[in-house]
Image (cartoon, grey):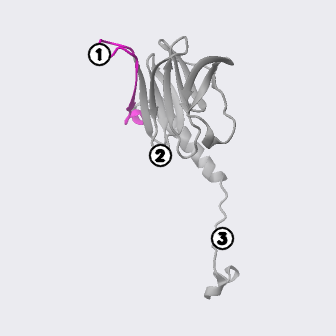
Amino acid sequence: MQLIQGFSLDPHPGEYDTWPETSALRFEGRPTGTQLPGYVVEAQYRCRHGFLLITSDDCPYEEANSFVLLDERFQTLASAALGAMYGSYLLHDHWPLDDDSLQLHYQMRRFYRLRVRPPQSLLRRGFELRLERDERAWVTDPRAKASVAALERSLQAQRADAIVDAVPVVNLGEGLEPPENWGRR
């Protein structure tokens, strides 16, 4: 798989809660006639079966991803989704593992493998996108270890930059001393 650029989704007018569930897909600025779930293209790959796109709804605290395999005419061959109501699946990083699979990094140490499975028999005539939890990726894959370390550094930097004003709020009518007298005994 090769990381590419060129795909985008049309923006929607109005308030977020009025947007439809799908967006029009563009390739190199031109309409494709295809609608995809979501509002943002998070990642896009060229693979031997066409194009693999990862999209999201760009919804804070309820992040989720849709995965769509498209053919050369931008028709959907297979799709899958990862998300949960009131859950957060914010995609931190991703990289190809081989011609048919990607590694996906979510949260601190949550990894998934996304496999493109071509038709193999009369029982499975179409393509399939199979999403599997990869419990050991962060231990066995050097790229996963590096991704975890990068996320930890990013979170530490955010914590260091955060200014917390933790002055307690008190009701002096309840007989408590004012803050300027605290610690003077």
Residue sitting nearer the eye, 169 or 183: 169
* Residue assigned mark 3: 167
Q: Is residue 103 above or below residue 174?
A: above
Residue sitting nearer the eye, 36 or 64: 36
Q: Looking at the image, is mark 1 or mark 2 earlier in the sequence?
A: 2
Give the number of the disc on residue 123: 1
Q: Which element is circle 1 on?
A: loop
* Amino acid type, callout 3: Val
Give the number of the disc on residue 87: 2
Q: Is residue 38 rendered to the left or right of residue 84?
A: right
Q: Is residue 176 visible?
A: no
State the separation of the CA atoms marked 2 and 3: 32 Å
Residue found at x 62% / y 49%: 158
Measured as percent of width and height from the top left, residue 149 is found at 52, 39
Q: Is residue 13 visible?
A: yes
> Do the CB atoms of the residues marked 1 and 2 lie less than 8 Å apart?
no
* Amino acid type, callout 2: Gly
Q: Dot 2: few (<14), some (14–19), or many (≥20) neighbours within 10 Å?
A: few
Instruction: Tell me if residue 113 is in the magenta stretch.
Output: no
Q: Nearer the viewer, mark 1 or mark 2?
A: 1
Measured as percent of width and height from the top left, residue 26 is found at 64, 20
Residue range highlighted in magenta: 118-139
Residue found at x 33% / y 12%: 120
Q: Looking at the image, is mark 3 or mark 1 earlier in the sequence?
A: 1
The answer to which image quadrant residue 2 occupies is top right
